Image: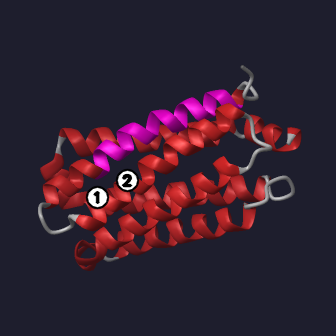
Amino acid sequence: MKAEIEIYKNNWWMFLIGGIVTLLFGIVTIINPGQTLLSLSFFFGLYLLIRGVLEIIISLVSSKQKKLWFVNIVLGALEAGIGIYLLQRPLLVLKTFVVFVALALLIRGVIHFIEALDSKYPATFRTWQIIAAIASVLAATLVWRYPVQGTLAFVWVIGVYAIITGPIMIAFALEARDGFKK
């Protein structure tokens, strides 16, 4: 357990970057939803590409200490691949975007939940993982359930999700930097 905490502690800045990118994405989405809708595939593609690459790096660095490192590499590769796909096919993406978003949110939520169940992690870590899992699964459900009823509402759901999880990721990074001390 101590080795895994050291991995998070030594790489806290990657979680911080991910949290900042997520928060900025959410702010841009909420402030200007109309323009965001027009360029959503680009912004989200870039977001997924960055998050996917960071997830792969974090997983490789922690592969010897973390049980789910391979699952996180697969998720990171999936996120990065979807990000590249979104960046290359903006018109096609608008038709299939909701499915990709909901799937990525759902997978992320499941992984957060699985990591929260691992009792070897400190309580602070598990709490952040549970909060992130609930937010991810809730956002995935809303996005999947109401894709056609309003693309503007869809943009708002993604924006609110990012505004909620961005600070959670930043707080997690700062807790990791300090080694999850109480």
Q: Residue at x 42, y 58 (%)?
A: 46
Q: Observer-nearest residue: 97 or 13?
A: 97
The quarter of the displayed image where residue 93 is located: bottom left
Which residue does the image show at 42% across and 69% down from the upper left? 103
The quarter in which the C terminus is drawn is top right
Residue 159 highlighted magenta (yes or no)? yes
Q: Main secondary structure of the magenta part?
A: helix
Q: Secondary structure at mark 2?
A: helix
Q: Which residue position holds label 2?
A: 138
Q: Residues within 10 Å of mark 2 (few under 14, many from 20)?
A: some
Q: Quadrant of the N terminus?
A: top right
Residue 142, disc: 1
Report which quarter residue 53 is drawn in.
Answer: bottom right
Q: Do tag 1 and tag 2 residues touch (Cβ < 8 Å)?
A: yes
Which residue corresponds to the image point at 53% horizontal and 55% vertical from the top-left? 51
Q: Residue 173, image x and y in percent?
A: 62, 34
Q: Residue 110, image x and y in percent? A: 55, 60
